[in-house]
Image (spheres, helix red, strand yellow):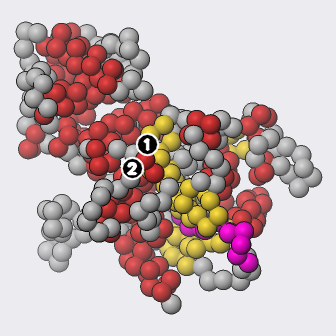
Amino acid sequence: MQIKESQTKFIDIIKALEEVIITQSGADVFSEIFKLIYAKLADEIGVASGKHKAKFISSKSYEADIQKLFSRATLKWNNIFAPQERFNMGRECLANCVHIFEGINVAQYSLDDATQAFEYILPEVAKKKRGQYFTPEHVIQLMVKILDPKEGQLIIDPACGSGGYLINAIKYINKKKEKGAGLKLSNIYGVDIDDKSFKIAEAIKIIAGDKYSYNLDKIDTISTKLWQELGLKKHSFDCVFTNPPFSGDITKKEVLENYELAQTLREKLRPRMDRHILFFERIFDLLKPGGQAAVVLPQGVLNNKNMAYVREYLLTNAQVLAVVSLDRNIFRPYTDIKTSIVFFKRWEASVDRLLDYPIFMAISEKSGKDHLGRIVYKKDAKNNIILNKDEKPIIDHDLDEIAKKYIDFIKK
C-alpha cells in the first residue's frame, strides 16, 4: 500500500513499516526502520541538490538503488552506522517498505511529528528498563521559557534523547534575538550514550535542517572521561536542560568514587546509586558559577526522607529558582511516575550565599494527556477542537500559564 503524503502523519508511515517488517521479516524493527529513514533522507538530499532523480521508488532496480542509498548514508553519517551495515530484511519485505515510502518527503514533517513517530518505535522493554521517555514539547517549552537562555551562552543536555530541549532552546533564542548573524550552534551540545536515542536525535537534526545542527556526541555522561571526550573543562556551561533516565543503578566503584553524593556521612562509599542522582551531581560539574539548570526529577527526590542528602547538596551548591510539580499523566502511557521540574542557579563564589529567599512554586493540574496517555486538546463550547494560527490542534495544558506567572514573580 502506498501512502499519500497529504493524508497521513509520520507516525502512520512508521506503523505501516512496522507491520510489514514484523509480518514479513524476522529482522529488528527499530534497526530496519532507521536504515530506511536514513536511506530516504540520503535520497531526498541528493534530489534537492540536483545530484540525481528520486531513487526511493518501486522499480526493477529498487533493491540495488536502496542498498546504494543506504551505503551512501553510512558514509555521510558514519557516526550512526558501521560501513559494513546492510538491510537484514528480505527482498519482498524491502520492496513493500519502499512502496510505503514512495512519494513521501520525510524532511517536510514537523519536529513534533518526527519525535512522536520515533518514540513510538523505541522498544517498550528499553524504555522501561532505562527509564527513558522523551519529554513532551509543552514541558520543554516551559523549561526553556523559565530558564531564558541567551545568545552566546554554552548550553547542554547531558541526556539529550531526541534533542528536543536543544532544538527548542535554539528556536527560543532565534525568536528573541534581533536580525543578523545566525546563532552560533557550536555553543550547543547534546550528549547521550544510548545508541537508539542517538540515531533518533541525529535523524531529527537532519529533518530540522542546518539551522539546528548542534553538537551531538555519543558519550556516557556519568563517565570520568566526559570532559576529555567533550573537549571542554568542568564548569563551562551557562545552561543545562535535561530529563535524566530514572532507571538503573550504578555499582561500579571506579565510577562511584568520583561522586560526592556516593559518599556517606562517614565517608564510606555507597554500594550503589540511582543513575539520576549521579546525573544530578554531574549537572553541577557542568555548570559554571552563576550557570542555571532545569531538571526533571522523580518527586521522591524532593519528598522522601532517604533523599534528604540530595536536597542538602542542592541547597548548599545552588539557589533554587523554582519548582513545578507535574501532573502524573505527563509521561503516560510509558510511566505514571510523579515528577517535578527543579530550576536552580549555581552559587557564584564571589556572591554571598543567601539563607532565606523566595522560591517560585507551582502545581500543574492539566498535563495535556488523559490517564491512558492520550493527547487532550482544547475544545470550544460546541466541543470542536480549537486550532492555532498554523491550523494545528491546541493541547489542553496549563504550563504556558505557569511560565507567565513565573515571569511575573521574578519582576516583583
**Nearest to the observer: residue 22 or residue 82:** 82
Query: x, y percentage for residue 61?
Result: 11, 9
Q: Secondary structure at mark 1?
A: strand
Residue 89: give its label. none
Q: Secondary structure at mark 2?
A: helix
Q: Amino acid at mark 2?
A: Leu
Residue occupying image coordinates x 47% and y 47%: 189
Query: x, y percentage for residue 32?
Result: 32, 22
351 in the magenta segment: yes
Callout 2 touching callout 1 (CB < 8 Å): yes
Range drawn in magenta: 340-352
| Residue with the mark numbered 1 | 215
Q: Is residue 5 left or right of residue 22?
A: left
| Residue with the mark numbered 2 | 185
**Nearest to the observer: residue 356 or residue 291:** 291
178 in the magenta segment: no
- The quadrant of the image that shows the N terminus is top left
Residue occupying image coordinates x 56% and y 73%: 322
Query: x, y percentage for residue 349?
Result: 72, 68
Kindly tell me whether residue 225 is visible in this rendering.
Answer: yes
Residue occupying image coordinates x 21% and y 70%: 379
Q: Quadrant of residue 405?
A: bottom left
Kindly tell me whether residue 124 is visible in this rendering.
Answer: no
Q: Quadrant of residue 139?
A: bottom left
